[in-house]
Image (tube, grey):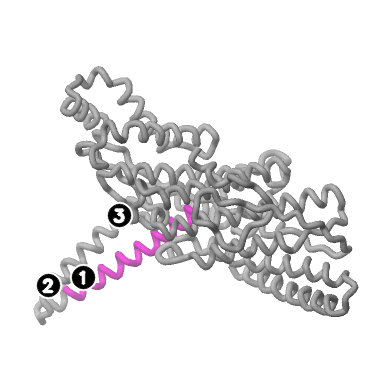
Amino acid sequence: MLASQSRSQTSRRLSHEQKSTRDTAILKNKSAPRRHSMQVPPLSAASEYVPVSDFKTVQAKGKSRMEVNKLMTQERRLRDGCKNMLKALPKTVQNAQHRSELKSQLSSIQSNITTLHAQLQKINLKTALECRQESLNGDELPNPFPLIALAAKETAHADNFADNLGSFIETHYHEKQSKFDPEIKTLCASRELMRNASPSIEGKNWILQYFWQLQQAEHRFFQEDKCASTVFEWYDAFEGHPIIKKSLKLEKASVLYNLAAMLTQLGCKADRNTTEGLEEAIDYFEQAAGTLQYIREESSLKTSVSTDLSRSSLSTLSTLMLAQTQECIWYAAYKKGKDEDPSWQPSGMEAAAVSEWFTSARESLRQPLSSSMPKLWVDMICIKELYYRGIADWYMGIAEMASDGKMKKVAGIAKVHRASLTLKRALGQWRAA
């Protein structure tokens, strides 16, 4: 599978720089554990980081992603119309009142677009919240730390897709359309299943099935990336504006993006209180990172028509998924060590690796993604960066305080003090978010 290309060599320590290839290796840290009576608990309190009020607000609004996308499209068209009218009206005394009315209307439309964009960000937050709610079944404990799940892109029904395929077969291959009606219906049905796929193994298989069918049909029915008048319409996952093109590259890239989004949702739904659930989450987030990196690097899928499919955005999202992978790896090692020996202390190097990955994700944020993604996502990245940096200093400081050398003891005390300040700062940001 395409998404599995990112897991060629699994281990427990990540390198400081992220490799740009799809087979990014996750390195294990096999250093010997250090024992001490002091300990810092994992990021358990942050499982309540995303306020439930946002989830209730989205439900109260009662608008789906597609409805918000269509409203934003209408408002953007009105905004463009007002701008064109302003440009067409000469700046004369007679037109002063009309220009003033147009400017007032333009300001009102821009305010509506801002409100709808905020609503779209809340819907993106709702994706992770729904995954968290679905994971709480029966007597199961809430997940010990929050994770970010990507929302899938919305797409409209491809009008005349079947008719265009049939016409191409008749004109290019000189075969009757009726002879291939079952195959054409299967392809169209697969697209509908992909559009309505839910975050499950079955939904993932539907997306993969449609993608492989596109792969097989690409060189048979699409000439120069087009098939007659077939138009594909996709909405940006972060901005909400529509992308309408006669391009199979857009279709394939968007389908793969939805595959990566579903993998992140499955990773968030995994029960991270168990070793098996943590391994599932690690696997899903690695596959998601590999899929995003594949879209970015594969020449036949390169497209910069939208925020979510730009090269910089795909690189940032891939880095973020790898950071969450390392976070799950750290917690799995922590849980395993504590289950075997309650007095076991983890290595600060593993926590430092988690912090470095979240630092890389924060530093790779670029416009327009940085202003389009939910603010809580940015806050969560910054908080986790500080938290795991503090955890790393804490455990490394404890280890040095337990050594025989006087200078190491002093350095250990300094690191523990620095860790307390860093953790206090992270807690302050969490409360202010």
Of the pair 78 and 100, the residue shown nearer to us = 78
For mark 3, what is the residue?
73
Task: Return the x and y of residue 16 as percentages of the image width and height.
Answer: 60, 63
Identified by mark 2, the residue type is: Leu
> Contact, CB < 8 Å: mark 2 with mark 1?
yes
Q: Which residues are magenta?
A: 99-124
Query: Is 304 left, or right, of 324 in this rendering?
Result: left
Identified by mark 1, the residue type is: Leu
For mark 2, what is the residue?
89
Helix, strand or loop for disc 2:
loop
Q: Quadrant of residue 382?
A: bottom right
Disc with the residue nearer the chain's start (2 vs 1): 2
The answer to whether residue 380 is seen in the rendering is: no
Vertical position of residue 259 compared to residue 115: above or below: above
For mark 1, what is the residue?
102
Q: Quadrant of residue 220?
A: top left
